[in-house]
Image: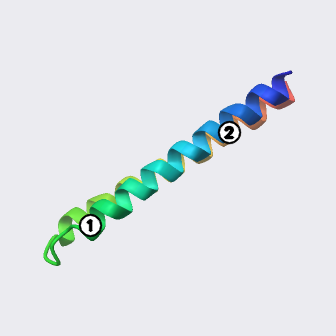
Amino acid sequence: MGQDRAELAIGRIERAVARIESAATRGLQNLAPDDGALREAHEALRGRVREALAQLDGLIVAAEKS
């Protein structure tokens, strides 16, 4: 049962990330070419989200082993 809940949670997270990335890509396409600072901030935020998701993945794996 715990495995099923973990898999459902991972699936929800993956779908949410896909929606976020899709929205972010659309937003970046609308930026003016001189919005370099905003692009850099966006990339930094993407990196932080990636790190947070990796931490969540680690927590889920650890919970599954308990």
**Colour style of the rendered protein structure:** rainbow
Q: Is residue 46 above or below residue 5?
A: below
Quadrant for residue 23, please give it. Answer: bottom left
The answer to whether residue 1 of the structure is visible from this angle is yes
Point out residue 63 in the picture as x, y percentages from the top left corner. Answer: 77, 27
Write down the residue under mark 2.
Answer: 10
Badge 1 is on which residue?
39
- The correct choice, above or below, for 45 with respect to 62 in the image is below
Judging from the image, what secondary structure is the residue with disc 2 in?
helix
Q: Position of residue 48 (x, y in %)?
A: 44, 50
Which amino acid, mark 2? Ile
Which residue is depicted at the point 31% across and 59% down? 42
**Could you say whether the residue bearing mark 1 is in a helix, strand or loop?**
helix
* Residue occupying image coordinates x 13% and y 76%: 34
Question: As shown in the figure, which amino acid type bears the numbered disc 1?
Answer: Arg
Residue toward you, 10 or 60: 10
Q: Quadrant of the C terminus?
A: top right
Decide: few, some or many residues near mark 1? Use Cα within 10 Å; few <14, some 14-19, many ≥20: some
